[in-house]
Amino acid sequence: MKLQKNTLNMSAVLLGCFFLVAVIMPLLQMFAACWQADVGKIFANPLVLQGICNSVCVSLTATIFSVTLALLLAWCLRRTGVRGKSLFQVLLLLPMLVPSISHGMGLVIIFGANGRLSNLLGLDGGIYGFWGIVLGSVMYSFPVAYLMLSDVLQYEDYTPYEAAAVLGLPRRSVLAVITLPYLSKPLLNVIFATFTMVITDYGVPLMVGGRYKTLPVIMYEEVIGRLDFAQGSVLGLLLLLPAVAAFLIDMFCRGRVGAGFVSRPFVVRRSPARDCLAYVILGAVSLAVVYPLLSFVQLSVASRYPRDMSFTWHNITATLDKGALTYLGNSVAIAVAVGLIGTAAAFICAYLTVRMPCRGGKFLHLMAIISLAVPGIVLGLAYVMFFKGSFIYGTMVVLVLVNIIHFFSSPYLLMYNSLGKLNPNLEAVGATLGISRLRLIKDVIMPQTVGTLLEMFVYFFVNSMMTISAVAFLANAKTRPLSLMINQFEAQTLLEAAAFVSLLILVVNLALKGCVYILKKLLQMHDRRNVYD
């Protein structure tokens, strides 16, 4: 037992050292670079000041639309009697399976100067600029906001509503007294999280921004184009501020939401008019989500968009000739490594902080969730400055490492919550029966959390397949993931090739989610057979 305890303590020390090297030291290196920059000159630059204003305006506008849409969709699927909710859920979450820059490209295909709907409706000027960024950002961010709000509504207690009905309270009073207070703190969390997603994204502004520059685009251009790391550090610090605010809000709300026990699931009463309205809303949003993805298919086999839309295989073969399969192999290798290593690390970290309180447990928990406050573009820049010249720089290892840290928090919190729901006396009973802690983990805890482990792997894999911001500064010609080819083809105005790359990423992510779904069903059938036996 003492040997096993020492092993777990050693694991905590190793995880602490890992976070020290992979999180704290790169960020400190970036902060130190800020002192080398001429801050006064940077903020005197009208381009930077305009970029800050543009980012704030775009992010505020997109956040309002995105959160409103997400709340409306969550209501449609949680508070109505529509059928086919699983199908609608899959369609609404499709935007999460492609890079943000692909959403911008979809807008160009549909509403660009030669877009399909632009030509059909006789629209002039295209989608470029402020409203293009807003629309693309809404498409990119609303699925995440929807998931958060849907989860909140799913576990709302129906008892207060039942009591209000007995007392004869009008609907307006119920909304003001019960619903709004319940949603206030989660909604604040969602607003800050969505705002952070939008203000730190450069994929959509890079594609449809045109002359309307946002701060992440300016940072990307300064670092990639001019190799001005000092100025990039200052801009990265600015992008870090709203993310830190969102992180603090998330910490504040997380400890207060979901702490209550749900005594009765929410009861949805029959209302044909309400359900009809929900079908209209869900159908319209699903069409808006699916149509750009279908346009990628058409564009991939078009001879020359938009002049000649006749069928051809040339775009696909040309994209493959440019190394798409090699870069796809890089992406899959990175995603698998991130999924396996990240899931193992997140599980061990969660176990140490939940099931085995140890010295430094609070430090491990803080390090595990701190990546929520670090945008990918900032983390990528910090890694360039810290690891440049090291033996892992320019290799797959640094790409795997940055993706693990970038996406670590959400899988960790999934496992953190799952382990917290297990019987707290398992370890004590195991020690009494002479069962080792490692065997208890292998034979009891892991089988009970296998569904969460699979979801963790999927999260790491999918996000690693489509990320651009975290790896843009670190990849080279040999290690480049497939998602970065979208930037390359967009710069060369090869939209047909960029559309095919987006489809490849979507197909791989859908295939993985489908395989995991089947695997979970098989595991459930196996558990039922064991129960009957």
Image: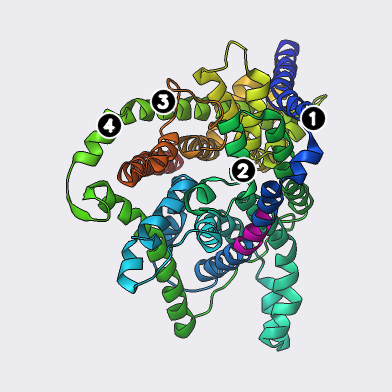
Residue 272 position (above or below residue 35): below
Task: Kindly identify the amino acid type of the residue bearing the numbered disc 3.
Answer: Asn
Q: Quadrant of the C terminus?
A: top left
Query: Is residue 93 shown left or right of residue 435?
Result: left
Q: Disc 4 on helix, strand or loop?
A: helix
Query: Is residue 330 shown left or right of residue 183?
Result: left
Alpha-carbon span between mark 4 and mark 2: 31 Å
The label number, if any, that marks residue 363 in the structure image: 1
Task: Kindly identify the amino acid type of the residue bearing the numbered disc 1.
Answer: Phe
Q: Quadrant of residue 258?
A: bottom right
Query: Is residue 442 shown left or right of residue 263?
Result: left
First in sequence: mark 4 vs mark 1: 4
- Residue 59 part of the magenta segment: yes
Tell me which residue sits at (70%, 34%) in the image: 231
Query: In the image, which residues are magenta?
Result: 55-62
Image position, residue 105 (x, y; %): 41, 51
Tell me which residue sits at (76%, 12%) in the image: 2
Judge whether residue 494 can be spotted in this image: yes
Q: Quadrant of the N terminus?
A: top right
Within 10 Å of disc 2 (Cα), the crowding (few <14, some 14-19, many 20+) is: many
Residue, disc 4: 320
- Foreground: 246 or 57? 57
Residue, disc 3: 330
Residue 95 position (above or below residue 79): above
The label number, if any, that marks residue 500 in the structure image: none
Q: Disc 3 on helix, strand or loop?
A: helix
